[in-house]
Image (cartoon, rainbow, N blue to C red):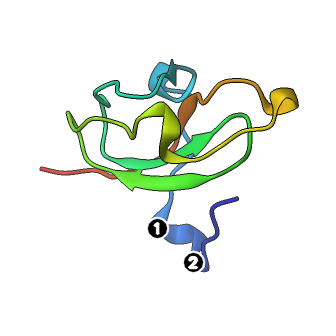
Amino acid sequence: MALFKYNHYFTQTSHGNFDNLHGPGAAVPDSGIYRCEGCGHEIAHTKNNILPPQNHHQHTQSQGTVRWRLIAASQTS
């Protein structure tokens, strides 16, 4: 789980981009922290860059396929 110390640097939102799941090799629509839904592995990624391939990390059968979710977006101007 992503950690933070100062909550005044974060704003809660209900934006739909946090609901989308992205597969390995997909281009991400937002810069930020992405979390694997199956195992909880987290990565920082920048907008329009490609997510790691399926073999980036291994899952057990119970964890299912690698699926990335945006959990913290960074704002850029």
Q: In which quarter of the image is residue 28?
A: top left
**Position of the N terminus by quadrant:** bottom right
Relative to 8, say whether 35 is above or below. above
Give how far across and how far down residue 62 sits, in percent.
87, 29
Relative to 24, say whether 35 is above or below. below
Residue drawn at x 29%, y 28% as measured from the top left = 29
Residue position for label 1 = 9
Residue drawn at x 36%, y 37% as measured from the top left = 51
Relative to 17, say whether 45 is above or below. below
- Mark 1: which secondary structure? helix
Q: What residue type is labelled 2?
A: Tyr
- On residue 48, the disc is none
Give how far across and how far down residue 11 sits, in percent.
51, 52
| Of the pair 30 and 59, the residue shown nearer to us | 59
- Mark 2: which secondary structure? loop
Please rate how many residues cluster around mark 1, counting C-alpha atoms within 10 Å: few if below 14, some from 14 to 19, many from 20: few
| Of the pair 57 and 16, the residue shown nearer to us | 57
Q: How many labels does the image show?
A: 2
Residue position for label 2 = 6
